[in-house]
Amino acid sequence: MKKREGYTLIILLVVISIMSIGLLVAVPVWETQIQREREEELIFRGNQYVEAVRLFQMKFPGRFPETLDELFEEKCLRKLFKDPITREGDWDIILHQESFRAEETRQTFQKVMIAPQSALQAIASPQILGVVSPSTAKSIRIYNDQETYDKWLFFYGQDPGKMPEIVYYGQAKKE
């Protein structure tokens, strides 16, 4: 009878070892799938902000929102979405810069400024065009020819075929 108890313990150890190996294989696949889902959610949420700015422009022609809260308050956005890539969920804000082209009532911005949300109070009359993730991590997917999340720009007047010149808040001006 004691011989069988020894075999049961050995079988149990083998089963546990096989399950451990299976988990070691499954975890990276699971992490990749979660990252892909976050990327899809980033694109969805970023495009929601683009659409909200477009609706804001229709309500208030020639004017841009000064805060993300204003998009919600004016019912251009059904809720304030968080950045799905970063733990904090805070977006960097894409702001209007001086140069743009008007093409048949469609504005195409060639130069934008990116600032953290916390810096909006320090900027005189900010004009929000959209959002971008502050994460500099490399993405799995390539979006608009960009491989890092901080280059995945979502803004009103964006030309998907051409990356605008980016000025970062606090960056020294070139002369």
Image: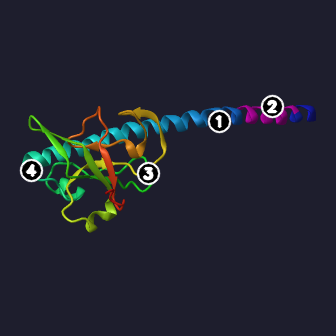
Judge left or right: residue 128 versus residue 85.
Answer: left
Q: Identify the mark nearer the N-term, 2 or 1.
A: 2
Where are the magenta residues, as a range? 7-18
Question: Can you identify the residue that label 1 sits on?
Answer: 23
Q: CA distance from mark 2 to mark 4?
A: 74 Å
Q: CA distance from mark 4 to mark 3?
A: 32 Å
Camera-side residue: 6 or 119? 119
Question: Can you identify the residue that label 2 sits on?
Answer: 11
Question: Can you identify the residue that label 3 sits on?
Answer: 86
Q: CA distance from mark 3 to mark 1?
A: 26 Å
Which of the 4 quarters of the picture holds residue 27?
Answer: top right
Q: CA distance from mark 2 to mark 1?
A: 18 Å
Camera-side residue: 2 or 139? 139
**Residue contact between numbered discs 3 and 1, judged by CB atoms under 8 Å:** no
Kind of residue at badge 2: Ile
Judge left or right: residue 99 versus residue 164.
Answer: left
Q: Identify the mark nearer the N-term, 3 or 1.
A: 1
Disc 2 versus disc 1: nearer the observer: 1
